[in-house]
C-alpha cells in the first residue's frame, strides 16, 4: 500500500486514495453508501432544495443513484454535469436515467440536445464527488478543477460525499480550490462552512 505523510503531493494522495478505494469490498461499500444516502436524504439541506445538482457515481465512488431516484420520487428537479473540452462543466436537467449516455472520461452525462441547461438557485444543492475531504471542506478531486470552477459562483449549498476513513485533517490546497458547505460520511453529516 502507498504511504502518505504530511508533505505528500496531490498526485501521491490521489494514488493512495484510489488504492484505498479499490481495497474496499462491495458489501462494505454498499453499507456505507446506504448510510451516506440516508443522512443526506434526511437532512434539511436536501428537503429545502429545489434542484439537486449531482454527479452520477462510478464504481468505487459513494453511490448517487439512490439519491437521484429519491429526488425524482420527491418531485425535485435533478441536474447532472457535462464536461466540456476547455475545463468547463455545465449541468443539465434530466427526467430519468435514460437521459444519460457515456461521455467525456467514460462518465454518464446528459444526452446532448435532449436536456435543458439547469440554472442554479439559492435553494439548489450540489452533491460533490472527491477522493478525500479535509476538516475545512476542501476536496481532493481528480485534478481537472471542474468542480472548483463550478462552485466558485454557485449560490446554493454544496455537499461532499466521502467515506469516513478517507477524511483528512488537512489536504494540500491551491488558491482556486473551493470548499464544500457540508460533508456527509457514513458516520455523520456536518456543516463545515457557515
Image (cartoon, rainbow, N blue to C red):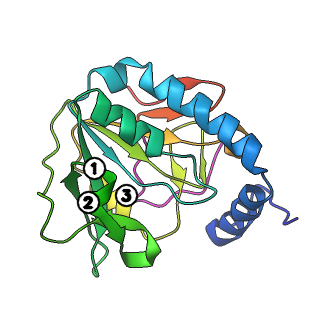
- Say which of marks 1 and 3 sits in front: 1
Q: Furthest residue to the bottom?
A: 85
Residue annotated with mark 2:
99
- Say which of marks 2 and 3 sits in front: 2
Whether residue 2 is situated above or below residue 123 in the rendered picture: below
The residue drawn where x is 64% and y is 56% is 60
Whether residue 70 is situated above or below residue 8 in the rendered picture: above
Where is residue 174 shown, x and y percent of the image? 48, 61
State the residue in front, 129 or 193.
129
Which of marks 3 and 1 precedes in the sequence? 1
Mark 2 to mark 3 CA distance (whole Å): 22 Å
The residue drawn where x is 42% and y is 37% is 67
The residue drawn where x is 18% and y is 32% is 122
Q: Secondary structure at mark 3?
A: helix
Which of marks 3 and 2 precedes in the sequence? 2
Residue 141 highlighted magenta (yes or no): no
The residue drawn where x is 52% and y is 34% is 183
Mark 1 to mark 3 CA distance (whole Å): 23 Å
Residue annotated with mark 1:
96
Using a 10 Å C-alpha cutoff, classify the residue at mark 3 as few (fewer than 14 neighbours), some (14 to 19) or many (20 or more): many
Residue 172 highlighted magenta (yes or no): yes
Determine the image quadrant of residue 53.
top left
State the residue in front, 54 or 183.
54
Using a 10 Å C-alpha cutoff, classify the residue at mark 2 as few (fewer than 14 neighbours), some (14 to 19) or many (20 or more): some
Determine the image quadrant of residue 167.
top right
Where is residue 40 shown, x and y percent of the image? 46, 28
Quadrant of image for the C terminus: top left
Q: What residue span does the magenta drawing correspond to?
A: 168-180
Where is residue 177 shown, x and y percent of the image? 42, 56
* Left-right relation of 135 to 3: left
Q: Are marks 2 and 1 in contact (CB under 8 Å)?
A: yes
Residue annotated with mark 3:
147
Amino acid at each position: 500500500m502507498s504511504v502518505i505523510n504530511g508533505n505528500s503531493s496531490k498526485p501521491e494522495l490521489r494514488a493512495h486514495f484510489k488504492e484505498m478505494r479499490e481495497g474496499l469490498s462491495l458489501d462494505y461499500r454498499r453499507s456505507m453508501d446506504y448510510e451516506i444516502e440516508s443522512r443526506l436524504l434526511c437532512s434539511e439541506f436536501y428537503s429545502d432544495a429545489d434542484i439537486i445538482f449531482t454527479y452520477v457515481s462510478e464504481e468505487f465512488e459513494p453511490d448517487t443513484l439512490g439519491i437521484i431516484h429519491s429526488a425524482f420520487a420527491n418531485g425535485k428537479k435533478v441536474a447532472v454535469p457535462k464536461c466540456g473540452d476547455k475545463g468547463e462543466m455545465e449541468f443539465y436537467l434530466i427526467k430519468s436515467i435514460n437521459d444519460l449516455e457515456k461521455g467525456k472520461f467514460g462518465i454518464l452525462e446528459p444526452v446532448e440536445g435532449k436536456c435543458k441547461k439547469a440554472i442554479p438557485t439559492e435553494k439548489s444543492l450540489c452533491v460533490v464527488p472527491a477522493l478525500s475531504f479535509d476538516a475545512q471542506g476542501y476536496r481532493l478531486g481528480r485534478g481537472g478543477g471542474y468542480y472548483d470552477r463550478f462552485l466558485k459562483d454557485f449560490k446554493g449549498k454544496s455537499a461532499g460525499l466521502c467515506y469516513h476513513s478517507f477524511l483528512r485533517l488537512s489536504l494540500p490546497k491551491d488558491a482556486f480550490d473551493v470548499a464544500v458547505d457540508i460533508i456527509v460520511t457514513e458516520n455523520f453529516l456536518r456543516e463545515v462552512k457557515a
